[in-house]
């Protein structure tokens, strides 16, 4: 493992500050503008607006495992460039590619239409609406990685989706096929089917929120497709999937449903989800898997995380002080990949993290994960300690 990661990250941060903090030449006029939201362009008539942005997540991780050798590492977790914009009042688009992270390839690549009140129609490569956690931006995740439960959720898929949003509730419905680029551990075996999500926030005020949601995915698998569910111990740099169902070659289809809840009061928040999957197999009985998590956080410096009504998601926070904002987070997550002849293991992770948001564009995170596998994919009890750090630049 190389310990030059800190120097690289500081260099990236310095370059980002130089770009975001330097005014553009006067000749650029009002058409071009650089600020915390990236480099933005607006046509003289105002009918075309473009924004160039990106995110850099650089991680370092150390592992202490009593069974499986996992190498300490430092690398880019994400290195994404994005071009987004609006055309007229009704159309918007985004093209985002990870050019150097641990999961390279196209991420967001879509065109959206918003010309109908309360309705947004999107086509392309986007995050399917199963699970609240999966739809949260990696820039605003409370901990460095999503929970073990995310192995049961699809992440990015290619398809079409409609989302209808009102003051207290949202309905999302889409039909999806394979993603443009595969993502490690997601349940996106080759196939197609609908995904839907319904959210309701009976309480939504400036300082408090109460949110509930349900979601459903049905996916018919293509002939010869292999459904495989697996996950690392909540570290993107781990080189071993300690929970792994193996390839289920006889799977025909599956149904997954999710339940979600969110509570927010000033600087304190809590979020929980449960996902259950039922896999239909030919020449074999059905198998069922489940995952869940409960996480909570407190912003020590008094700021609050925002709640996005239109999407029904917990967002990030804005530091009020020149010294930034500090947030303490903890989580329990579980994944069970054992049923009938499938022995993918059962894991429980206990995590704690500290986030320091220096400003709107730069953040530092420190996480500790205690992973208990009872048993792992090989039928052996295993324990893992994960210590990891992240430096983030996003614009």
Image (tube, rainbow, N blue to C red):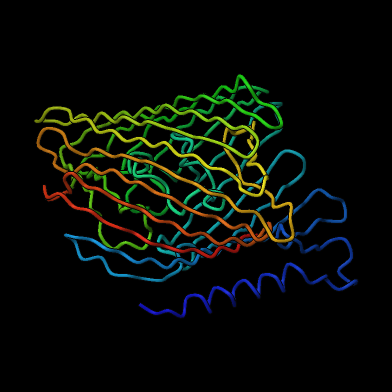
Residue 215, image x, y percentages: 44, 27
Tell me what residue is drawn at x 44 percent, y 56 percent: 367
Residue 378 position, x and y percent, is 12, 51
* Image quadrant where one finds the C terminus: bottom right
**Residue at the image point whose x is 68% and y is 56% from the top:** 360
Foreground pick, 273 / 113: 273
Foreground residue, 357 or 132?
357
Q: Nearer the viewer, residue 270 or 141?
A: 270
- Tell how many labels: 0
x, y percent for residue 383: 22, 53
Q: Seen from this angle, which residue lies furthest top?
A: 202
Residue in view at x 49 percent, y 47 percent: 329
Residue 382 position in % (x across, y down): 18, 52
Give left or right: position of 280 versus 171. left
What quarter of the picture does the N terminus occupy?
A: bottom left
Taking the spot 68% from the left edge, 34% from the top edge, the residue there is 114
Considering only vertical position in the picture, is 52 above or below 308?
Answer: below
The residue sitting at the front extreme is 300
């Amino acid at each position: 493992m190389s310990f030059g990661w800190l120097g690289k990250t500081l260099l990236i941060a310095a370059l980002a500050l130089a770009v975001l903090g330097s005014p553009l030449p006067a000749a650029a006029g009002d058409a071009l503008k650089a600020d915390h939201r990236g480099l933005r362009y607006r046509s003289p008539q105002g009918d075309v607006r473009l924004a160039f942005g990106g995110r850099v997540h650089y991680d370092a991780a150390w592992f202490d495992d009593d069974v499986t050798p996992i190498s300490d590492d430092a690398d880019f977790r994400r290195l994404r460039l994005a071009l987004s914009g609006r055309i007229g009042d009704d159309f918007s688009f985004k093209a985002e590619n990870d050019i150097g992270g641990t999961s390279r390839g196209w991420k967001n690549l879509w065109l959206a239409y918003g010309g109908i009140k309360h309705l947004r129609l999107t086509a392309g490569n986007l995050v399917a609406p199963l699970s609240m956690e999966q739809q949260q931006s990696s820039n605003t995740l409370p901990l460095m990685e999503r929970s073990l439960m995310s192995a049961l959720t699809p992440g990015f898929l290619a398809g079409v989706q409609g989302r209808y949003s009102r003051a207290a509730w949202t309905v999302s419905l889409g039909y999806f096929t394979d993603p443009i680029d595969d993502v490690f551990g997601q349940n996106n075996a080759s196939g197609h089917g609908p995904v839907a999500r319904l959210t309701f926030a009976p309480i939504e005020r400036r300082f408090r929120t109460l949110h509930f949601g349900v979601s459903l995915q049905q996916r018919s698998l293509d002939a010869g497709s292999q459904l495989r569910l697996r996950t690392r111990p909540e570290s993107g740099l781990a080189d071993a999937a300690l929970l792994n169902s193996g390839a289920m070659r006889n799977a025909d289809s599956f149904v997954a449903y999710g339940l979600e809840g969110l509570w927010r009061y000033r600087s304190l928040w809590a979020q929980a989800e449960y996902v259950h999957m039922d896999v239909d197999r030919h020449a074999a009985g059905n198998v069922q898997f489940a995952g869940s998590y409960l996480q909570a956080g407190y912003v020590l410096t008094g700021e609050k995380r925002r709640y996005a009504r239109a999407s029904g998601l917990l967002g990030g926070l804005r530091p009020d002080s020149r010294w930034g904002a500090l947030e303490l987070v903890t989580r329990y997550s579980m994944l069970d990949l054992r049923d009938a002849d499938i022995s993918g293991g059962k894991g429980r992770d206990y995590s704690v993290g500290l986030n320091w948001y220096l400003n709107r564009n730069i953040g530092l995170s420190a996480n500790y994960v205690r992973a208990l596998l009872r048993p792992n994919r090989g039928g052996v009890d295993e324990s893992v300690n994960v210590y990891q750090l992240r430096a983030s630049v996003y614009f």
